[in-house]
């Protein structure tokens, strides 16, 4: 009498597929993650560098220092020019941000002058 080959039970595979489908349905449709009250201060340091780049480029476009100051103060309060300069130096190592290094350096210098002239800290 030939020996029977053991086969993986089909119900295990079916259960796995159904479990994954139900998990995805619950995770994405029934109880999706909702973010609220997210501010730039809660960003990871790498993304704060991207935020600084975005604010600096926006300033270079519209020259509205009041708006730029407000945006940077949402990321750090009080604003530390030294921390901004350190972030800019780290950007020089990142190939994506390297083209903007001089523009952001110029923005930080103008921000410092604005803060000194208005007495804001």
Image (cartoon, rainbow, N blue to C red):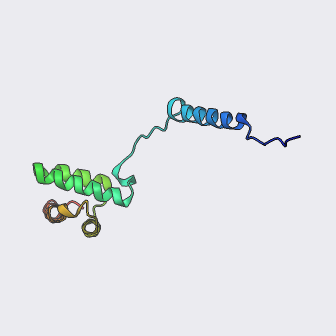
* Residue placed most toward the observer, 60 or 1: 1
Spot occupied by residue 86 in the image (x, y as percentages of width and height): 28, 70
Spot occupied by residue 74 in the image (x, y as percentages of width and height): 30, 52
Can residue 77 be spotted in the picture?
Answer: no
Height in image: 16 above or below 108? above
Height in image: 8 above or below 119? above
Residue found 40% across the figure and 53% down from its top = 42
Residue found 25% across the figure and 57% down from its top = 52
Height in image: 60 above or below 93? above
Number of marks:
0
Tell which residue pokes out farthest to the right in this image.
Answer: 1
Quadrant that contains the C terminus = bottom left
Residue 19 appears in which quarter of the rendering?
top right
Spot occupied by residue 75 in the image (x, y as percentages of width and height): 31, 55
* Residue placed most toward the observer, 115 or 54: 54
Residue found 26% across the figure and 70% down from its top = 89
Tell which residue pokes out farthest to the front in this image.
Answer: 1
Please indicate whether residue 48 sits to the left or right of residue 112 in the image. right
Please indicate whether residue 16 sits to the left or right of residue 57 in the image. right
Tell which residue pokes out farthest to the top in this image.
Answer: 30
Residue found 15% across the figure and 59% down from its top = 118
Quadrant that contains the N terminus = top right
Can residue 96 be spotted in the picture?
Answer: yes
């Amino acid at each position: 009498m030939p020996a029977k080959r053991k086969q993986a039970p089909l119900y295990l595979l079916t259960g796995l597929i159904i479990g994954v489908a139900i998990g995805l349905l619950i995770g994405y449709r029934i109880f999706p993650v909702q973010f609220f009250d997210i501010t730039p201060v809660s960003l990871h340091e790498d993304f704060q560098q991207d935020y600084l780049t975005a604010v600096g480029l926006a300033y270079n476009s519209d020259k509205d220092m009041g708006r730029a100051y407000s945006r940077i103060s949402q990321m750090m309060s009080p604003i530390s020019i030294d921390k901004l300069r350190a972030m800019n130096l780290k950007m020089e190592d990142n190939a994506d941000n390297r083209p903007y290094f001089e523009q952001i350096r110029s923005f930080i210098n103008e921000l410092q002058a604005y803060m000194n002239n208005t007495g804001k800290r």
